[in-house]
Amino acid sequence: MSAEVALVYRVLPNSIDVNVDELKSRITERLSPKYKVDRVEVEEVGFGIKALRFYIRMPESDDYSSDEVDEILQSVEGVGNYELEYFSRISF
């Protein structure tokens, strides 16, 4: 039986001047191919601020971790703040 872990991250840009489409591409490129980005949603926060919600899957393995995803997000230019909103094991 193989298992995966589902993660949902909410990412805020560090400025309203950050193009969220470019930020989405930069984050997706950094996560891939190791982590599978299933979907990205853009959420209007207010006052011109937009948040990105990333739906990510990874194998349940010691080679993968949410800590590594955190490090990747911290290293992407334009990321201001982020939070892990959801974490769950998926088995099939």
Image: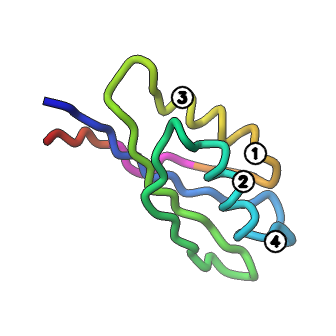
Q: Position of residue 2 (x, y in %)?
A: 20, 31
> Is 73 on the left-hand or right-hand side of 77?
left
Amino acid at dot 1: Val
Q: Indicate the quadrant containing the N terminus: top left, top right, bottom left or bottom right.
A: top left
Residue at the spot of label 3: 67
Asked if marks 1 and 2 touch (Cβ < 8 Å), the reply is yes
**Residue that appears at 82% across and 67% down:** 18
Instruction: Report the Cα–Cα distance between label 4 and label 2.
Output: 17 Å
Colour scheme: rainbow
In magenta, the rendered stretch is 83-87
Q: Residues within 10 Å of mark 3 (few under 14, many from 20)?
A: few
Instruction: Report the Cα–Cα distance between label 4 and label 1.
Output: 16 Å
Residue 42 vertical position relative to residue 73 in the rendered view, above or below: below
The residue mark sitting in front, 4 or 1, is: 1
Q: Is 63 within the magenta?
A: no
Disc nearer the start of the sequence (4/3)? 4
Residue at the spot of label 1: 76
Secondary structure category for the residue under label 4: loop
Disc nearer the start of the sequence (4/2)? 4
Disc nearer the start of the sequence (4/1)? 4
Residue at the spot of label 4: 16
